[in-house]
Every structure is written in C-alpha cells, then in structure tokens.
Image: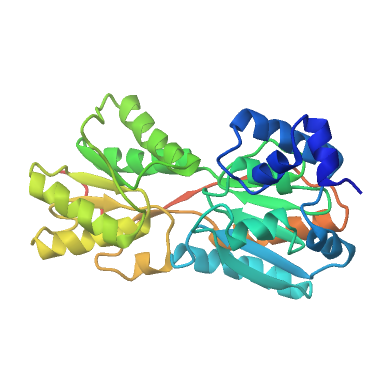
Amino acid sequence: MATIKDVAKMAGVSISTVSYALNNNTKVSNKTKQKIMEAVRQLNYQKNGLASDLKKSSTRTIAIIVTDLAGPYYAELVKGIQEVTLSKGYDLLACSSVGEETSTAVKFLTEKRVDGAIVLAYNISEDIIEQSARKEFPIILLDRKVDNEFVVSIEIDNEEGSYMAAEYLIEQGHRDIAYISGMAKSDLNFMRIRGYERALRTHGLDSKNRMHQFGHFNRDNGYSMTKMLITQGNLPSAIMYANDEMAIGGIKAFKEHGIKVPSDVSIIGFDDIELAQYVRPSLTTIMQPKYERGALAAHLIFQILEGKEVDSHYKFPTKLVLRDSVKKMS
C-alpha cells in the first residue's frame, strides 16, 4: 500500500508539502498541488488508516452533499435518493458543504467515510472531487462536469429551460424583460443566463442594464432585489428569476408596493418547487425533474458498486409549467 513518503518521492517534494496539499493549505502553490494530486491518483494513496479500514468493509451508507440543506428544492431530490438507498438496505447521510475545505463534507469524500457520494455543492472543488473519485468509491455530480473516469455527471438542460421561459414571455408580447439572479458562481447559473440572453438576441432584444445579480439564490434576496428594482423606477413588463424562491420573494415585494402580478408586471421562475403552485398568483415556471434526478443518481451509485458499466453523463429535459403569473400583452 502506498505511503505519504511514496507520494512525496513521485511528486519530487517533501513529506510536509504533501501533507499541506492534502489538507488544502494555501502554502502550497496550485502547480505543486496538481503534481501531488497526480501522484496520489497514480499510487491510489489513501489519506489515513481510517480510509483504508473503511474500504475493507462497506459502511452501507451513501452521502448527499449539498451547499445548503435549508432550501425547499432539496426535499424532492433527497426523497428520490432516499427511496432507492433504503430499498438497497443502505442509509442516506445528508451533509451541508458550508464552511472551509476541511469541513465534514470534504472528509466524507477524501477519507471515504461512506460508500459513495452524490454532490450538489459548488464549493467542493474539482481537485477534491478528482482526488476522491475511485472505481470503488463512485461520485455522482449534479449540475456540473468533471473530466474523470470515476465521476458521473447528471445535469438538466438549464440553458434550454431558461431560453424556453424567455421565449414564452416574448410570445406573450413582452419586449422589456429583466433577469434577477444571485451571484453567478456556478455553471448552472451561467447556463440559465445564457438561455435568457440567447432568446433576447434571437428576437433582436437588448438585455443590457436588465441583469441584476447579487447575494444568494433565496427568497430574501429575491425580495430585496425586487424592492431595489421597484425603487429605481421604470419597471420592465416582465421579470425572469433564477429560481422559484427568488420569484416568490419578488411577489411579496410587489404586493407590499401595491404592484399587481401579472396585470402590472409578469414574472416567471425556475425549478417548480412545491410552493410555486400555492402562492398567489400561482407561479409560471420551468419544471426540472427533481425526484427522478435523485433516484437516478442513487441507482447509478449502486450500479457502479455492483461493477456495472454506466454512462459518464446524463441530461434531463425541462418543461414550461403555465400558471397565473404571466399576462399576455395586448
């Protein structure tokens, strides 16, 4: 079995430098870290004795690692994962990745404290994913890709879904369409923005000065950013929100200012969370198959653990769900 000394020798660095790199210490440059991680992969080095012991006997536990456990989006996703894991006699452990890269979530990956992991967390770096992925330790990534033979990606067609939303608003006669989002840190958000911008370009419309991005992708931020838009005046005829939570926050802000949805302004969300159908007006949105995606992720982990071949990439389509928050312009 490879030791930390073997890794240091192959990478041409000291043992202490390898230790720093494996603990994500900023003392190690990215170039040196990449050399060390390549040696780790080639030697199949396990970080400590705990990792080795766990691989000798199954923990019968799968982890789902997400950025924030509080969001309503995760409920259906986790339900799909849990039903499959329970049917296989496994436990499901849900973990937030909030915090430093030495967090518990990272340890589940790098020290193999579970038998496999489903990751929907953009603050888990590509290096950590690549360092952790092994044939005997499958990792399923949601909403992003890593070029590694032991990592499977499951995406939804975010760009096409956002294009569909903008196209629908344009078909209803809207020409001044704003987009409200959180800070663009993920491929998912970039793809949704691309879909919005592509639809506007296709119809000769301008998106300049109509992009609003700040803070988190949650209800409070949707509320705050909508209030900011109202204060600026010159409201657009329609607003696309990066997700349903932000759109629901926007509905609250409009109600407080006596602005009626959809007669004064039309809005559309993304995700089709359960609450979207119960707010008033009910929210027109883009549906993504959350339960199905979770179930597929879990099925793939067990297929890999059983030695079966699976594809490296899967993509789910999206669907426009029409409700009451969009008005047709006369």
Residue plotted at (24% across, 27% down): 206
Residue 45 in sight from this viewpoint = yes
Question: How far from the left and from the top, in percent, is residue 41?
Answer: 79, 40
Question: Toward which corner of the image does residue 179 lie, by quadrant?
Answer: top left
Please tell me which residue lies in front, 159 or 91: 91
Tell me which colouring the rendered structure shows: rainbow
Which of the image's four quarters has the C terminus?
top left
In this rendering, is residue 258 above or below 130? Answer: below
Please tell me which residue lies in front, 157 or 305: 305
Please tell me which residue lies in front, 108 or 274: 108
Q: How many marks?
A: 0
Asked if residue 198 lies left or right of residue 134, the reply is left
Question: How far from the left and from the top, in percent, is residue 306?
Answer: 87, 58
Question: How far from the left and from the top, in percent, is residue 257?
Answer: 9, 60
Asked if residue 204 lies left or right of residue 230, the reply is right
Asked if residue 120 lies left or right of residue 54, the reply is left
Asked if residue 78 lies left or right of residue 15, the reply is left
Question: Toward which corner of the image does residue 273 lie, by quadrant?
Answer: bottom left
In this rendering, is residue 18 above or below 202? Answer: below
Residue plotted at (76% across, 44% down): 150
Residue 321 in sight from this viewpoint = no
Residue plotted at (49% across, 59% down): 98
